[in-house]
Amino acid sequence: MNDPNYAGFWHRFSACLIDIFLIILSANIINKIVIGFQLSSGTGGLLLFILYIVLPWLYFTIMESSTRQATYGKKAVGVTVTTLGIERISFGRANVRLWGKLISSLIVSRFHSRWNDK
């Protein structure tokens, strides 16, 4: 088994910036299309809410579990997502990985806001 080379902070940070940019760009394009169809405010609002939840979820889980093993941002900085055995991760593992990152981010941000309140 080969020892994996782990990506450092700046590689991960750069990949994250690229991915966020691509997701926001895609969401804005879809938003313009939705507004172009002149959906009722309730339907359009619900569609956009779903879009901003579903788009990032599908982007990260499908891309990281695909044969590419990376999002566009990760590929741009040379990072691939693998198991410890350097194999491709499953869609389920990519899903758990994404939700784990989101939950830990919420916990850290909540802790950070309480720390700054004191």
Image (cartoon, helix red, strand yellow):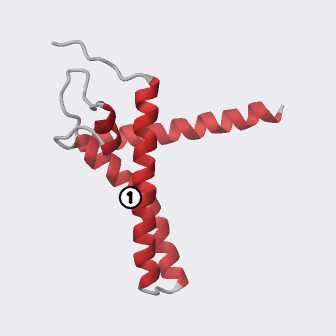
Q: 51 above or below 58?
A: below
> Position of 101 compared to 64: left or right?
right
Give 76 or 74, whichever is nearer the viewer. 76
Q: Position of residue 108 (x, y in %)?
A: 61, 33
Q: Residue at x 43, y 83 (%)?
A: 36
Q: 4 above or below 17?
A: above
Where disc 1 sits, the SS reads: helix
- Quadrant of the rendered structure where residue 25 is? bottom left
Q: 67 above or below 83?
A: below
Which image quarter is the C terminus in? top right
* Type of amino acid at the residue the image marks with label 1: Leu
Q: Position of residue 106 (x, y in %)?
A: 58, 41
Which image quarter is the N terminus in? top left
Point out the residue furthest to the front here: 76
Mark 1 residue crowding within 10 angstroms, few (<14) / some (14–19) / many (20+): some
Give 108 or 31, whichever is nearer the viewer. 31
- Quadrant of the rendered structure where residue 37 is? bottom left
Q: 5 above or below 50?
A: above
Point out the residue furthest to the right here: 118
Q: Residue at x 29, y 30 (%)?
A: 78
- Quadrant of the rendered structure where residue 31 is? bottom left
Q: Residue at x 25, y 29 (%)?
A: 82
Give the residue at mark 1. Answer: 55
Q: Position of residue 46 (x, y in %)?
A: 49, 73
